[in-house]
Amino acid sequence: MRHFSVLFLLVALIMGCKKKEEKPTVIQEETKPDFIVAFGSCNMPQEPNPFWDDILAEQPDVWIWGGDIVYADTEDMDRLRSIYAMQDTVSDYAKLKTEVPIIGTWDDHDFGVNDGGASFAVKKESQQVFLDFMGVPQDSERRTREGVYASHDYQTEAGKLKVIILDTRYFRSDLVKDEDPNRRYKPNIADDATVLGDAQWAWLKNELTHSDADFNLIMSSIQFLSGEHGFESWGNFPKEVEKMENMIVQSEAKGVIILSGDRHISEFSKTNLPGLAYPLVDFTSSGLTHSYFSYSGEPNKYRVGDVVSDKSYGIINLNFKDKEADMKIMGDNGAVLQELKQTY
């Protein structure tokens, strides 16, 4: 009996000392967005281009130029072509071109003149050089239509995205100088003052009204919501701002987000429009190779978060099922400088 008790105790001790079997650790992979948009503006091929490797690492489904692809400011088309050609020699950008669709618009410095508009003498010639750089086929209707505006549809298994590219240069009326030395321009309130021109407005109305996309991104180049600073913006044409807001509401287009550049700062602006079921966001991303490093503040009643005055680019992760856009202002090495999530 004593031997049995000792044996029982030994077995119990051995069993008690046996290491419990550990459950395997389950690592949940981060869900990949349904569609990734990368965009940016204000770029000089002569300067270091620090972000193309980071942008490639994001694995975007499309890259959108927001204007000022190059700084040419010239009526010499050969010079303009040569500067565009310099951008194509930037190695990681050249790699991006082979892996990701590239679309976009121009702004004033690639258009050809600082703060330029409809009166620019060689805008037709400049348009063709721009379309060459963007790889637009010679038989495209964009080659014979005035202005560089266009739309692009992207259908996925999860949902659909429409990207509307505006031209805020070719048709834009003259800016009005402000007598205030602290402001460059004041509103042009003339009845015929325009940003887009009649033909582009009619085209935009058709694009929005007949869109069946889950998200509709509008690339504007110049800021739409922020207009108190006195530099270039839609705010210099208040009647055009009202027209755009009414058109977005009346079109009933889903998930409209405005993208902009130009300012050498990045920020989020947001407002609620009567009759629109979701907030209207203007995501400004600028600049890629240089920025407003001496920025000390400016008014923007629509601003959400802080202004980023460092060099940056923009990322928008779209989730069609949850109707969510995760918008990020990105710095070097994948640093998230500001973020705004919006459900639609």
Image (cartoon, grey):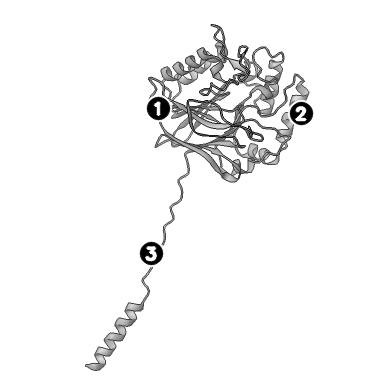
Element under label 3?
loop
Q: Which residue is mark 2?
A: 82
Above or below residue 295? Residue 56 is below
Residue 167, quarter of the rendered image: top right
User: How many residues crowd around disc 1 within 10 Å: few (fewer than 14), some, or many (20 or more)?
Assistant: some
Element under label 1?
loop
Quote the CA–CA distance across marks 2 and 3.
62 Å
First in sequence, mark 2 or 3: give its number: 3
Mark 2 vs mark 1, foreground winner is 1
First in sequence, mark 3 or 1: give its number: 3
Q: Amino acid at mark 2?
A: Ser
Q: Residue placed at 35% from the left, 78% from the top?
A: 17
Above or below residue 28? Residue 283 is above
Q: Residue placed at 44% from the left, 16% from the top?
A: 246
User: How many residues crowd around disc 3 within 10 Å: few (fewer than 14), some, or many (20 or more)?
Assistant: few
Q: Residue placed at 60% from the left, 46% from the top?
A: 333
First in sequence, mark 2 or 1: give its number: 2
Above or below residue 243? Residue 155 is below
Element under label 2?
helix
The residue furthest top is 191
Residue 316 location (% of width, % of height): 51, 36
Residue 150, quarter of the rendered image: top right
Q: Amino acid at mark 1?
A: Tyr
Q: Which residue is mark 1?
A: 278
Q: Which residue is mark 3?
A: 23
